[in-house]
Amino acid sequence: MKYFALLLAMGTLAACDRNDSSNDKEQRTASEEGSEVSDPRDLLKFTEAQGSVPSLPKALDMLSVQLALDRLGFSPGVLDGKNGESLKLALKGFQKASGLEETGALDEATMAALAKVNVTAPTRLVRIPAMFANQTFYPDFPADAAAQAKLPALGYRSLMEALAERFHTTPETLLALNSRDTQIGADKIIVVPNLPDVSPPSAELSARGWDMTLLSLGVAAEQPDIESIIVDKSEGWLRTVDGEGKTIGQFPVTTGSSHDPLPIGNWTVKGVARNPEFHYNPKLFWDVSDSKEKQLLKPGPNGPVGVVWIDLSKPHYGIHGTGEPSTIGRAESHGCVRLTNWDAARVAGMVKPGTKVVFQK
């Protein structure tokens, strides 16, 4: 994510956005110093903070609608409060699932159906947990795969980037929600989109740190069971369908390019790799010289496939996350189906080996 110019514009909003292990002890809260934590995952909880929440900027007036759709499983992509194509796509998916006319408009019938989700306020005031703030960041994250292979993990560039993913939004939106006097860092208070908290995942999801990844993305471990996935190339969505043929979720996607078109047809899920390493093979990329060497890239949200890879029966093709959530539906991929990291994590919780996957025009 290319946030360097944005961070320069943020003034003191990013003043505490640094990873300095020498300050770890100073940044711990009194509660962390004085008591033992029964479950370390509780240290990733964003607790409610006291104080008045600023009024929502007019430019973000669709945030409550986006939040309702996100909670119902009809993702608008990033929660940016804008009435754009991604919101229209999410509304159409929700309308189809609700038996309404698929207009993509926020008409009275759609508003009534969305009212089942009680979004009491579009934003909330939270305290940033020290464990979240003090993770290792990579501000000079390289673009070259060979340089990335030297990193111990393909983590976030900054705390601002990590916060944006946690609350399914963008750094620009966080900037708009907060004053320029706001500082971010351990135990600091910040205004964020009003996403509900999720319960800590069960112990069996701790392999490769997946439980911590879910908490860091604000994604619930429990997801509905599905029988199939449908990906529509022309519309740019992925829908999850239950055993009765009902659409229970929809997510915006990027699907292939003119060089690597989406392989139209019927496939199946072979398996799911959570927090996967990535075997970088230049020969599989049309825009990379074959003279480049193969690389093994460590896991991380900024890796080529984000936090999850859903392997398909079509060789070398999968459904996966991305380190560039704002580009979903607006950029090309190398043939695979790409979602935001949080949406990819949701879909990963729905599928199992044998789940049907349909790629259609």
Image (cartoon, grey):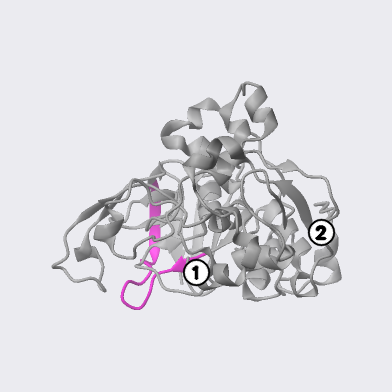
- Residue 24 lies, in percent from the top left, at 54, 38
Q: Residue at x 74, y 53 (%)?
A: 194
**Which residue is label 1 attached to?**
4
Residue 20 in sight here? yes
Comparing 137 with 205, the one in front is 137
Quadrant in the picture for residue 101: bottom right
Secondary structure at numbered mark 1: helix
Magenta range is: 253-269
Instruction: Work out whether 15 lies above or below 185.
Output: below
Quadrant in the picture for residue 251: bottom right
| CB within 8 Å, label 2 to label 1 | no
Q: CA distance from mark 2 to mark 1?
A: 40 Å
Q: Residue at x 33, y 51 (%)?
A: 313
Secondary structure at numbered mark 2: helix
Type of residue at label 1? Answer: Phe
Along the horizontal axis of the image, is 262 left or right of 122? Answer: left
Q: Residue at x 43, y 62 (%)?
A: 337
Along the horizontal axis of the image, is 194 left or right of 256? Answer: right
Q: Residue furthest bottom?
A: 258
Q: Residue at x 17, y 65 (%)?
A: 292
Comparing 181 with 260, the one in front is 181
- Residue 296 lies, in percent from the top left, at 25, 50
Mark sitting on residue 144: none
Q: Dot 1, how many residues are within 10 Å of its Cα: few (below 14), some (14-19), or many (20+)?
A: few
Instruction: Work out whether 21 lies above or below 295.
Output: above
- Residue 240 lies, in percent from the top left, at 56, 53
Mark sitting on residue 113: 2
